[in-house]
Structures are given as C-alpha cells and as structure tokens.
C-alpha cells in the first residue's frame, strides 16, 4: 500500500465512520426531535425505550470517527476543532443533556420533573442535529484558512445562510429517519399516530432537500465539477433520488423496515455525494491564502497510515458485527416493563 492510496483510503474510511454515525445516531436524534409530540407519559417512555439499547453505542461511531480523523489527518483535526470550538462544545453539551435526560427523567414520578427533562431531551436533540448540519454546511461552503492551516474566522462567520440551510435540512432528515424508526418500534394506537407523522416529515425533508440542492448548484458549482468530469459519478445522485422516492412507496405498502433501509441509504448516498464533490478537500479554504486542507497535504506519515489501516482492518469488522448483533437482539416492538426507562 503506497502513500497516495492510503491517503484516499483514509479519506473514505473517516467519511464512512461519520456516515455510520449519521445513519445510526440520526434516527435517535430524530426520535428526540419528535419526543414532545407524544401525548402521554407512557408514550414518551416508549420513545425513550425504543432508542434505549442503541443511543450510546451509536455515539461510539462519532468518537471513532473523531479519533480516526485525529490520527490520519492531525492538521485537519487541529484546524476544525479549534476553529469550531464553540460549536463543538455546544454539540458536546447537547449530547450530554440527551444522555442525562434519558436516564433521569423517569427517576421521579412528578409531571413537572418529567416534563422538564422531556423538554431538555427534545431541545438538545433538535439543536444537536442543527449544529451537525451547520458544521457540514461550513465544510462544504469553505472556511478561511491561513497558509499555516490555522483558522481565521469566528462563530458569526459560521452562521451564514448556506450553513443555516444545511442545519435545517439535517434536522428535517433526522426527523423523517426517526419517525420511520418509531413506526417499526411501536404498535396499537401509538403506531397509528406515529405513522401519520412520517408523511409530513418526508415532505419537509424533500422541500429542504430541493432548496439545498438549488443553493449548492447556484453558489457552490465546484461541488458539481467532479460529476461533470466523470459522468458515471451521476449514479450516486440518481441512487439517492431513488432511495428518497422509495421511502413513501415502502411506507404505503406497510414495509417499515424497507422504508428505514431506504432512509439510511439516502443518508449514506447524500454524504457520498458531498465527499465526491469535495475530494480531495477535507476542509475547503476560501480565505485570501487559497489554502485548503486535503487528504494529501494534511495527513500523517505513510507509516502511521499503514499501521492504522492494519488496525482498522482488524477492528472494523468487530465494530460492525457487534452493532449488527445489538440491533438483531433488540429488534421488534417496544414493551414497557419494570426495567424500562
């Protein structure tokens, strides 16, 4: 394995880890965003127990992706985590609040106590999703990077219209993803009401997706250049459209699992499109220096990348296998018992 191959391989692997996080934690963030729509305390407990076996394991993918970024592309890690420090600290607090809310909201029976933690859980889920989208929007739009790879912006620079639009798009996407997951995990009257939430969330996401696509083509034409240069890459956007179109089709047929897999595929394909459009940039620079951080100029040494690749080839099958096992063990509808949240 030579240097350039390893650089591209780690570009793809870091992207795959973060995409895995988006798919897996995306649905429980979406469930959190929908949490306050539940009418009764029992229904909210069902929502919490639907994601209960999975939410903490899902976040491991984010930690692993961040660790891989640190080891494979340390300059990118340093620039991004220092430049987006305020946003990432806020995201960290949102993830902490979500975990605390899940564990403590049912420790006391009082309605004021539980409502307060329900609001904290739902609000942190929405804001966490929004921050993730804003970060993605900034990476696509570009950030001011100096020749020494240092960040030359501030929080206000990160809150431009394209980044905010991306944030709202991600919130809509995760809410759709979470609504489909809840349909799989609930039954009875609650299932019928949750099923009614899927269509509005699909419509909201499709509208945001259209706006996002139009804004990208209008203001970021460079992201479409790889597709013009290599027309076969248009298979990825085509596949994403088919995956999105298949979601309401599968829901109409009552095949919730197929709809959830289509929603997951849509997330993966949308991130693939972003990765293809940005390649080889990990952080596109739009500052006066014209400097961008790529998988070639911001990577670790070939020896480090090679050693890490060996470890990844050993560890990734274990992580994927464990994740598959957990989802298989806890498949089926949620039933509340004495051990439930």
Image: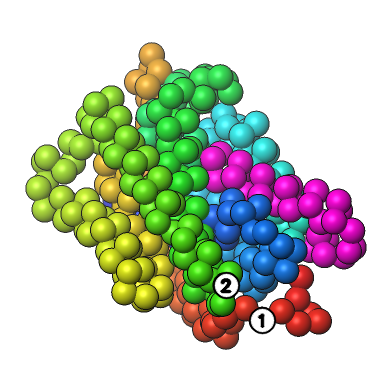
- Looking at the picture, does residue 12 appear above or below residue 144? below
**14 or 164: nearer the eye?**
164
Q: Quadrant of residue 45?
A: bottom right
Q: Percent x, y for residue 219? A: 28, 25
- Looking at the picture, does residue 325 appear above or below residue 224? below
Q: In the drawing, does residue 155 fall left or right of residue 204?
A: right
- Looking at the picture, does residue 62 appear above or below residue 299? below
Range of magenta residues: 103-131
Q: Is residue 36 magenta?
A: no
**185 or 279: nearer the eye?**
185
**44 or 322: nearer the eye?**
44
Q: Main secondary structure of the magenta part?
A: helix
Alpha-carbon distance for marks 2 and 1?
A: 14 Å
Q: In the drawing, does residue 33 fall left or right of residue 278?
A: right
- Rendered-image quadrant of the C terminus: bottom right
Q: Quadrant of residue 123?
A: top right
Residue ID at (32%, 69%): 252
Residue at label 1?
Answer: 335
- Rendered-image quadrant of the N terminus: bottom left
Residue 189's label in the rendered image is 2
Q: In the drawing, does residue 280 fall left or right of residue 157?
A: left
């Amino acid at each position: 394995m030579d240097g350039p191959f390893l650089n591209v391989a780690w570009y793809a692997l870091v992207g795959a880890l973060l995409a895995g996080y988006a798919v897996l934690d995306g649905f429980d963030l979406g469930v959190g965003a929908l949490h306050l729509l539940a009418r009764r305390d029992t229904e909210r407990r069902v929502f919490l127990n639907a994601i209960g076996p999975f939410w903490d394991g899902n976040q491991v993918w984010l930690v692993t992706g961040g660790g891989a970024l640190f080891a494979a592309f340390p300059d990118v890690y340093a620039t991004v985590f220092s430049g987006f420090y305020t946003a990432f600290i806020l995201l960290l607090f949102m993830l902490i609040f979500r975990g605390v809310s899940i564990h403590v909201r049912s420790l006391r029976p009082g309605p004021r106590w539980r409502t307060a933690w329900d609001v904290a859980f739902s609000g942190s889920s929405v804001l966490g999703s929004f921050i993730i989208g804003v970060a993605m929007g900034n990476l696509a739009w570009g950030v001011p990077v100096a020749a020494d790879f240092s960040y030359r912006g501030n929080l206000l620079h990160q809150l431009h219209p394209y980044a905010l639009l991306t944030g709202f798009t991600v919130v809509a996407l995760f809410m759709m993803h979470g609504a489909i997951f809840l349909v799989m995990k609930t039954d009875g009257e609650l299932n019928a009401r949750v099923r009614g939430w899927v269509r509005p969330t699909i419509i909201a996401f499709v509208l945001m997706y259209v706006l996002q696509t139009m804004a990208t083509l209008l203001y970021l034409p460079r992201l479409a250049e790889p597709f013009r240069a290599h027309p076969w890459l248009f298979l990825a956007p085509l596949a994403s459209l088919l995956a999105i179109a298949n979601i309401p089709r599968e829901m109409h047929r009552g095949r919730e699992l197929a709809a959830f897999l289509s929603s997951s595929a849509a997330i993966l394909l949308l991130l693939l499109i972003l990765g293809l459009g940005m390649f080889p940039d990990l952080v596109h620079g739009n500052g006066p220096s014209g400097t961008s951080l790529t998988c070639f100029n911001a990577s670790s040494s070939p020896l480090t990348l090679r050693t890490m690749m060996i470890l990844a080839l050993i560890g990734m099958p274990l992580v994927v296998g464990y994740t598959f096992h957990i989802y298989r063990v806890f498949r089926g509808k949620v039933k509340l018992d004495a051990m439930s949240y």
